[in-house]
Amino acid sequence: MRCSWAENADAAMQAYHDTEWGVPHHDDRALFELITLEGAQAGLSWRTVLARRDAYRAAYHGFDIGRVAGMSDVELTAVLTESAVIRHRQKIWSVRDNARAALAVIKEHGSLDAWLWGFVDGQPIVNHWRESAQVPATTELSDRMSKTLRKQGFRFVGSTICYAFMQATGMVDDHLVTCTVKGTR
């Protein structure tokens, strides 16, 4: 049995669940991509964002942190006109701000990976939920991550976004105990 949310998923969502969600990510570029996509998802469904993932990759130079940090206002305005991305001005501009904040983290801590995974002491938190209703939207840890990211200069990183990010990157494994696909188990 799969996680209950994945039972009625379309092929793209099913593939994401089965191969990516809850699997530990340690590449700075991949982490930056997921924090960007989770921020874009705010107020929308993950399916909406996942369907636009390739467009985001094209718009943001494959999530090359340095290149995104150097994007001009003209380039961001061009992203705003792309119909394949979610055209929300603050979300689009936040990606450049987040890239700049990520570069500062990398300079200070050596990698985005080391810094972000420090929130979970470098090890995934494996939960043992029996029902999807038990899975929280936020935790004290996601509250702390959100507050720290904001202080560092990141935007669109509220506690709910941070918890979803931790799930997506495998920092937290919230697959149900009945799920046959496990991120870290």
Image (tube, rainbow, N blue to C red):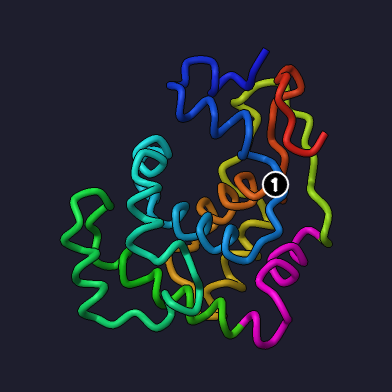
For this rendering, which residue is in front, 121 or 181?
181
Q: Which residues are magenta?
A: 105-120
Is residue 113 one of those drawn in magenta? Answer: yes
Q: State left or right for residue 48 relative to residue 153.
A: left
How far across and how far down the image is residue 165, in percent? 58, 52
At 44% from the left edge and 53% from the top edge, which residue is drawn?
Answer: 37
How far across and how far down the image is residue 162, in percent? 57, 56
Q: Secondary structure at mark 1?
A: loop
Q: Which residue is mark 1?
A: 170
Q: State left or right for residue 114 relative to residue 71.
A: right
At 78% from the left edge and 58% from the top edge, which residue is drawn?
Answer: 120
Q: State left or right for residue 147 relative to residue 113.
A: left
Please state which amino acid type lies under the numbered disc 1. Answer: Gly
How far across and how far down the image is residue 31, in percent? 59, 60
For this rendering, which residue is in front, 36 or 137?
36
Quadrant of the rendered structure where residue 143 is? bottom right
